[in-house]
Amino acid sequence: GFQITIIPDLRWRLFCKQLAKSNRLPPTLGVLEEHIKSMRLQTWAIFHLVQCLCKSNCSTQRCSSKRNDLLCSELSLCDLECTDDEDYDIGRDGSDDLENDL
């Protein structure tokens, strides 16, 4: 069979066979590259928001999680042995409960 290995060839083949209308074709290579760059930037930003680099209890504003009003996550270097979640425990045991639930 015919094997397509690059995006421009796929677009051309679908267009020639009229298997897809122009608005349903895969993106052009330039658009795809820009989309990938955008997704990489978003991934980088999210990763840096959810990962604190503290080696202690995250009790000061030096902690990026505390500074951004976030709880430390499994990606954090503090090993979740911190004091950022005294009132609220999320994700540690799979639940989403207030410790002092009324």
Image: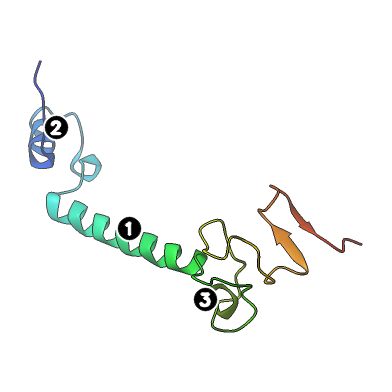
Q: Which residue is mark 3?
A: 64
Dot in front, 2 or 1? 1
- Circle nearer the N terminus (2, 1): 2
Contact between labelled residues 1 and 2, with CB atoms less than 8 Å apart: no
Q: Is residue 49 above or below residue 7?
A: below
Q: Is residue 29 above or below residue 99?
A: above
- Check disc 2 and report its element: helix, strand or loop: helix
* Disc 2 to disc 3, C-alpha distance: 48 Å
Q: Which residue is mark 2?
A: 14
Dot in front, 3 or 1? 3
User: In the orientation shown, which residue stands out farthest toward the front?
Assistant: 55
User: In the orientation shown, which residue stands out farthest toward the bottom?
Assistant: 61
Apparent side of residue 80 relative to residue 21 in the rendered image (left or right):
right
Q: Amino acid at mark 3?
A: Ser
Q: Amino acid at mark 1?
A: Met
Contact between labelled residues 1 and 3, with CB atoms less than 8 Å apart: no
Residue found 13% across the figure and 40% down from its top: 7
Q: Which residue is mark 1?
A: 39
* Mark 3 Cα shell of 10 Å, populated few (<14), some (14-19), many (≥20): many
- Check disc 3 and report its element: helix, strand or loop: helix
Which corner quadrant holds the N terminus?
top left
Residue found 40% across the figure and 67% down from its top: 45
Apparent side of residue 17 relative to residue 76 in the rendered image (left or right):
left
- Circle nearer the N terminus (2, 3): 2
Q: Nearer the viewer, residue 85 or 55?
A: 55
Q: Nearer the viewer, residue 78 or 38?
A: 78
